[in-house]
Amino acid sequence: MSKINSLFLGLILAGSVSLVNAQTTQPETSAATSQTTNPTIEDLKKQIAANPKDAESLAKLANAYQEVSDWPNAIDTWKKVSVLLPDWAPAYYSQAYAYQSAKDDANAKIAYEKYIAAVKPEEVEQNKKNLAYAYFYLAFTEQKTDPNKAKEHIAKSIQYDPTNQDAVKLSKALNS
């Protein structure tokens, strides 16, 4: 598993920059986007057709779908990665992000919870920003239905990223 993690480290580091940036913007969805031929996507689909268990190509394909805001295909592809690499936390984070972008909050919440559970203790340091966001998202979604759970989540979010002003504001609102 550590060799696979090393393989994907460069991929996820490149992807996490775009994910963090993308989280602060409104997602654009376009049915026409997925209908347009994208050579990168087509090449990756051919590679995967030849080797359906090529997790690296699947992760690249999922990222390519995200780049063109093709959320249904991104979600489906991240699910395939998660099946092949069930202990690889970044796949769940990316899946949650794709669900969130597709405005499927229930499945985004489940995927963020899976991400949090999949992060190993030795991976926490490199995942602090994403953990902070995942906990923030959970707190935000639970603030009305389970305020106590939301308070726990927002405290964790701030623990991982005390500079996140949205988390600080939500914490103040929950604790007032």
Image: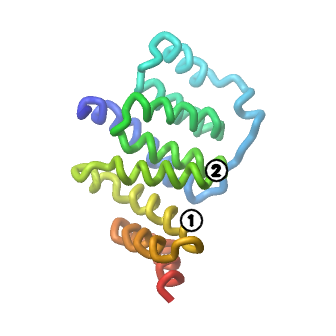
For image coordinates 39% across by 73% down, the residue present is: 155
Q: Is residue 8 left or right of residue 45?
A: left
Left or right: 144 as drawn, with respect to 149: right
Name the residue located 45 percent from the left edge and 31 percent from the top edge.
81
The disc placed on residue 141 is 1
Q: Is residue 35 left or right of residue 68?
A: right
Circle 1 crowding by C-alpha within 10 Å: few under 14, some 14–19, many from 20: some
Say what secondary structure mark 2 lies in.
loop
| Above or below, comparing residue 136 to residue 1 in the picture | below
Give the answer, above or below, for where 158 lies relative to 85.
Answer: below
Residue type, mark 1 in image: Thr
Residue furthest to the top in view is 50
Pointer 2: residues within 10 angstroms few (<14), some, or many (20+)?
few
Residue 109 at x, y percent in the picture: 53, 55
Residue in the foreground of this view, choosing between 76 and 147: 147
Residue 38 position within the rendered picture, expressed as x and y whole percent measured from the top left: 65, 25
Report the residue marked by disc 2.
104
Locate residue 156, reporting x and y percent.
37, 68
Whether residue 59 is situated above or below residue 128 in the rendered picture:
above
Task: Residue type at mark 2: give it.
Answer: Asp
Residue sitting nearer the eye, 78 or 7: 78
Quarter where residue 152 is shown: bottom left
Task: Indicate which disc, 2 or 1, sits on the residue closer to the N terminus.
Answer: 2
Location of the N terminus by quadrant is top left
Residue located 72% across and 44% down the image: 29
Left or right: residue 140 compared with residue 54: right
- Tell me what residue is drawn at x 45 percent, y 71 percent: 149
Q: Does residue 125 show up?
A: yes
Q: CA distance from mark 2 to mark 1?
A: 12 Å
